[in-house]
Image (cartoon, rainbow, N blue to C red):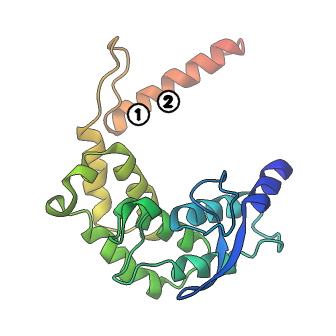
Amino acid sequence: MDGAYAALRRGLSVIEVPGHGPLTGWPHSLAEYEPPVHPTAFGTAYGLHLLLDIAPFDGRIRAGEVAETLWRLRLPGGGWAARSQGSGARPEVTAVVLGALARAGADPRLLEAEIHSCEALLDPDHDAFGLANTYVVTNVLRGLLRAAPASASLGGLRAVLVNGATGDPGGVITVAGARRWRRVGAIRRRRRCTRRGRW
């Protein structure tokens, strides 16, 4: 944990940006060394998640300042996007940010409007490509589970994943549905017990 926290501190960027104010966060890539290194929504959200996982009570990096940076990086029309995605909000980035803010204790009233905006971005007419992309769907699903566990969108996202699942080429395990997930878990438990000489 000490090494991970040290790396997190090394990558932290604290700068003053006109129009945004003071920003405390992480860039999209930890390999960015040429100053000024600007924190991004994606990098800062993942950095905040990691900070809350390994050092939530260490004051050397203040989670509140990082969370405030995410609000300052919010796009003028609402939501968040990766640096390379332009000025339009993206559901997968917005959900990752919302999940981090929720874990950091953000006011649910402030999150609510952004959650609705994130759900609206999932409209197939708006982003059919995103809904066909496992990375996008799983990021939105994970973010909403953290920020809005009662969201009506969760069932539809789960259905997208289940319906898009494929079988193992050997036909041994098909990952689709809760019953099949239980079967996968049972197989793994039996394998562990066999390796340990127990049943």
The residue under the point 70% across, 63% down is 51
The residue under the point 52% across, 62% down is 42
Q: Is residue 46 left or right of residue 88?
A: right
Q: Is residue 71 left or right of residue 159?
A: right
Displayed quadrant of residue 56: bottom right
Displayed quadrant of residue 69: bottom right
Q: Nearer the viewer, residue 140 or 180?
A: 140
| Amino acid marked by disc 2 | Gly
The residue under the point 86% across, 52% down is 2
Q: How many marks?
A: 2
> Where residue 114 sits: x, y (%)?
38, 78
| Amino acid marked by disc 1 | Trp
The residue under the point 51% across, 77% down is 73
Q: Is residue 83 visible?
A: yes
> Where residue 151 sits: x, y (%)?
34, 68
Q: Which residue is mark 1?
A: 181
Q: Which residue is mark 2?
A: 185
Residue 106 lies, with reference to residue 82, above or below; the image says below
> Where residue 121 sits: x, y (%)?
27, 67
Q: Is residue 199 visible?
A: no
Residues at badges 1 and 2 in contact (C-beta under 8 Å)? yes
Q: Nearer the viewer, residue 47 or 24?
A: 24
Q: Is residue 156 left or right of residue 19?
A: left
Per the model, the C-alpha gap separating discs 1 and 2 is: 6 Å
Residue 100 lies, with reference to residue 112, above or below; the image says above
> Where residue 17 sits: x, y (%)?
60, 82
Could you say whether the residue bearing mark 1 is in a helix, strand or loop?
Answer: helix
Residue 72 lies, with reference to residue 138, above or below; the image says below
Split into 4 quadrants, where in the image is the C terminus?
top right
